[in-house]
Image (cartoon, rainbow, N blue to C red):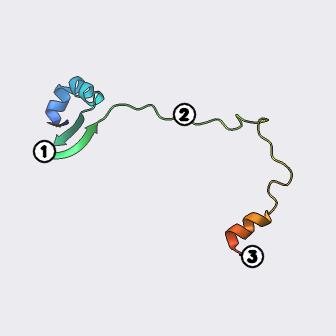
Amino acid sequence: MRITVGMHEAKTNFSRLVRQANDGDDVVVENNGSPVARIVPYVEPARRRKGGFARGMIWASEDCWDPDPELERLFYGGDE
């Protein structure tokens, strides 16, 4: 549900409007008939992942980055 309120009403009923926004309502604050703000629920920002958490669990063979003739043929064409 969209709720549009004026600046004075928003100041007077701020707690109620925050609860309504938290319950899923779209709360827009207007000043002289123009939208100026939206009250939205707080969302915890995603935590950054710490690098190196898999250290020692992953390995690569010595030739893992060497060119693969079969893949090159499939990607770039050739004997078909």
Q: Are marks 1 and 3 in contact (CB under 8 Å)?
A: no
Q: Is residue 35 left or right of residue 41?
A: left
- Which of marks 3 and 2 precedes in the sequence? 2
Local packing at callout 1 (Cα closer than 10 Å; few below 14, some 14-19, many 20+) is few
Question: Circle 1 — which element?
Answer: loop
Local packing at callout 2 (Cα closer than 10 Å; few below 14, some 14-19, many 20+) is few
Q: What is the CA distance from the residue labelled 1 to the residue labelled 2?
A: 39 Å
Residue 15 is marked as none
Question: Circle 2 — which element?
Answer: loop
Q: Which amino acid does label 2 sit on?
A: Arg
Q: Which of 22 and 65 is in front in this view?
A: 65
Q: Residue at x 79, y 57 (%)?
A: 65
Quadrant hosting residue 56? top right
User: Residue beneath label 2, please?
Assistant: 47
Q: Are marks 1 and 2 in contact (CB under 8 Å)?
A: no
Residue 40 is situated, as x and y percent measured from the top left of the image, at 31, 34
Quadrant hosting residue 75? bottom right
Q: Nearer the viewer, residue 77 or 37?
A: 77
User: Residue beneath label 3, please?
Assistant: 79
User: Residue beneath label 1, please?
Assistant: 32
Q: In this view, does 57 lie to the left or right of 28?
A: right
Question: Circle 3 — which element?
Answer: loop
Quadrant hosting residue 71? bottom right
Q: What residue type is labelled 1?
A: Asn
Residue 27 is situated, as x and y percent measured from the top left of the image, at 23, 36
